[in-house]
Image: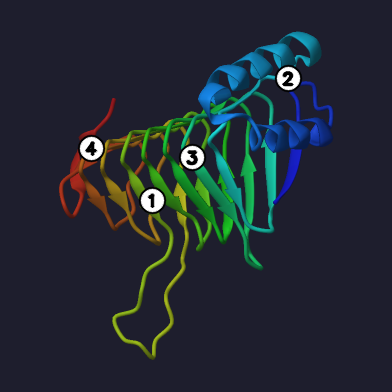
Amino acid sequence: MRIAYRDASGRDRSRLIGAVIELHRWLPSRFAEGLSWRLSSWLRRRTRVSFKWAARVTLEGDGLLRLAGSIRINSGTRITVAGERGAAAFATSLFIDNGVTILAYGNVAIGDHVYIGTGAYIDGRGGLTIGAGTRIAPGARIIAFNHSLHAHEPDTMKGITIGRDVWIGANCVILDGVTIGDAAVVAAGAGVRRHVPPSTLVAGVPAREIRLIV
């Protein structure tokens, strides 16, 4: 996988970060996490690059992963960028917690100040945009494609758009073709298969509008 990284001042640090990620592959398992965070602290002091990358992060595929600014990716996360349409761009102040899976067989764009909770599963093969300030709780599933009911029909890939400052609750499922408006809230355990208006709370399976958020 190719890595492109620009720090907070816009300086291209791709070679440095590529070397850091490669080094993490060879850290001894017994001391891996402690050494990883010490290296992150050294980067911040010496280069002002805020890049915390856990030792047990897996990168797969032949695509391009674009990173910017402050990035923190915790242990057990797997990121795949592959295929003709595969591309991923993660903006600044991104925090990906433990055990997250991100599959970018389509175009995946994540905005500033986004949090992705432990164990979340994100399949962006139909295209996925996550707006700035959005928080995704542990165990959420975001799946931007849909299998056909019949073998002779192709899968559908309409994509998913999630607006700014959205709260996606724990263990909810968001299905292909959905747009979630700015400042909306998806309650824990909800199954979202239709558009969600801005500033609206939805809950249930299938999810329905509960009330406006004012």
Q: Could you classify mark 3 by the number of other residues whose Cα lies within 10 Å: few (under 14), some (14-19), or many (20 or more)?
A: many
In the rendered image, which residue does mark 1 sit on? 142
Q: Nearer the viewer, mark 2 or mark 4?
A: 2
In the rendered image, which residue does mark 3 sit on? 77
Q: Residue furthest top?
A: 45
Q: Nearer the viewer, mark 3 or mark 1?
A: 3
In x, y percent, where is residue 11? 84, 27
Q: Image point 39% across, 32% down: which residue? A: 117
Q: Amino acid at mark 2?
A: Val
Rendered position, 65 above or below 95: below
In x, y percent, where is residue 55? 57, 31
Which of pointers 2 and 1 lies earlier in the amino acid sequence?
2
Rendered position, 48 above or below 62: above
Distance, label 3 to label 2, CA atoms, is 21 Å
In the rendered image, which residue does mark 2 sit on? 49
Along the line of sight, the residue nearer the viewer: 97 or 22: 22
In the rendered image, which residue does mark 4 sit on? 187
